[in-house]
Image (cartoon, coloured by chain):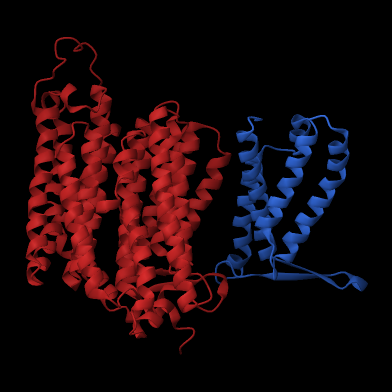
Amino acid sequence: MAIALPILFPFLLILILVVVKSNRASQLIAVSGSAALVLIAIYLFFEVKSHGILTLDMGGWPSPMAITLVVDYLSVLMLIVSAIIVFVISIYAIYFLPGQHKSTKFYVFFFALAMGVNGAFITGDVFNLYVWFEVILISSFVLIIMGNSKEQLEGGIKYMALNLIGSLLFLAGLGLLYGKTGTLNMAHLAQILRAEEQSVLINSSTALFFIAFGIKAAVFPLFFWLPASYHTPNITISALFAGLLTKVGVYALIRFFTLFFVQDQTFWLNMLLVVAGFTMVAGGMAASAHYDVRRILSYHIISQIGYMIMGLAIFTPLAIAGAIFFMMHNMIAKTNTFLIAGIIHKIKGTFYLKDIGGLLNQSPFLAVLFIIPAFALVGVPPLSGFFAKFILVKAGIESKDYIIVAVAVFTAMLTLYSMIKIWNEAFLKEDPNDNQSQSKVVKLGFMHFLPSVILGLVSIFLGLFAATVFDFTTQAANQLIDPEAYINSVLNYTMP
Amino acid sequence: MNSIILQLAAKYVRFLLIFFAFVALLRGHNYPGGGFIGGLLATLAIVYYSYAFDWRSVQKKLFMKPQGYVAVGLLMILLSFSPSLIQDETLMKGIWVSIPFGLLGQLKLGTPLLFDLGVFMTVIGVTLLFFFTLTKRR
């Protein structure tokens, strides 16, 4: 029963928030509700740890017929990280959403997005996954255009149009798959397709799913919607998207390409490897060309997606464990950089790096907060990013994919370059407007910094306890590489 | 629009459409139909009526705003989960009760019907919201 809570609980919160009129009350409900989501995710984690893979067949129908919810290690790790992000953003929104975004309305769509993301992580049914993608798409579209500005509408429509194409391809691939196999239950599909030697028939759906999830995950030739839209909404919403949206696409890629698209494996894995390399470099290069903090960070998301795809493409247990570790680290650190960009904006009134400076003297605490996710993203040893990249590079060398390893290391340099650029321009440089606007200095309370502090601590925690976390991601990877346990625990009703 | 034919037609067609909306809703348990289609048919009745008459009078007849319909619909969906939780069954399992009606046989009511009604209400609310927004009749 508890398995359905990550979906049911946000649904309940939405219903409550629709009725609540007062801003203050809705903020209180949102923060406590999202804290409860974190607790639910942690509870599920311990359940998975002690009982193995959890399944729930909705409506009590036998398994391949029912919509099955499945929680394995990968799902539960993603649930925890996304719940942490949701919790942090729910606090951040109180202080950083401008007045014209009514809190009550914002939180309704905020939890709709959270519900969609959680649903996508725990569903065991391909069509149900499609439904959750639609929930995510609609609620995120509403969130983008919430400020009602022309810029946001433009970004929102680009986002919606390109993602709808992705959804269309997803639906087409899903239909083909159903036509060929007669089932959409993931475990049942895996059981059928893994026994199938012939790959010709499956490749058409694989290609469609590859492109559909590629669009959602913003990989190399398909990422255009992301930089077109992410810098337009309020920074709170950008931060939420940075943490959750593309990662659902990556999750779906990992799930599908480990569970049942295993026929023409060498071809598809090489394809993924090439895409991963180009994604990393293209994102990194584009990031270094920009001077708007939000644009730098948006291109950066793309570059980091490349690492996750790289882990999937190498396809050893170590590499997939690394990819999952990287995903957890990246969701936390990336969101944190966006939160800090929001704080910079609050202090300086702009996101444009050339117009800001002198933050190191003005707010040393902010500098420390920026250093943590920036160093984590670059991969400086005690922080989470180092271990994530180290595992991926090690896996790459072990499987003799030297080119992708070289690309990954080169991209780390690009990351370092763009982080140093933000550091130099925003923190070290003298403030260009020093002599005019010194009179009004914005003072921020501790609560403004709290979300960033929490995420910073999680980043450090992931680095310090990397061995423990890596154990769990390894178990997740083992469950993915050898999906026997997954298939059996879902279908145990039908094959005693 | 001030067409007497349209107004006269709307008065009767409205009942017909709403009747068939409920037919579709109830039929949907085992045959094509269901909450979504029923909801669309019911909305059609309201939209048709609002073209024939003043839309303000239609909004008065709706008792509450379209958003209210959505909220009530979602609440019904959530409520339809609760019997399965109380009886400690799998989530969303259909729970049925039958009420005897003497000579008429018996009336079977279940949570799937409540769920479908929720969908019905939500669809009406959302479609009306689209309609009123797009025609600037809010």
Q: Residue furthest bottom?
A: A496
State the blue chain.
B
Left or right, residue A352 beside residue B66: left
Chain A as rendered: colour: red
The x, y position of residue A356, in whole percent, is 17, 23
Image coordinates of residue B25 in percent, x first then y, are 72, 60
**Residue at point 51%, 70% (across, down):** A67
Instruction: Return the residue nearer the eye: B88 or A409.
Output: A409
Tell me which residue sits at (76%, 36%) in the image: B50
Q: Evaluate whether residue A461 shows in this view.
A: no
The one of A433 and A256 positioned closer to us in this rendering: A256
Q: Residue at x 27, y 70 (%)?
A: A476
Q: Residue placed farthest to the right in the image?
A: B103
Viewer-nearest residue: A248 or A325 = A248
Relative to A17, say whether A186 is above or below: below
Where residue A155 sits, quadrant-wise, is top left
Does residue B89 sit above or below B78 in this rendering? below
**Position of A150 compared to A259: left or right?**
right
Q: Position of residue A310 (x, y in %)?
A: 19, 62
Residue A24 appears anywhere in the view: yes
Where residue A406 appears, as percent x and y from the top left, is: 6, 58
Where is A417 relative to A61, above or below?
A: above
Quarter of the image where one finds residue A39: bottom left
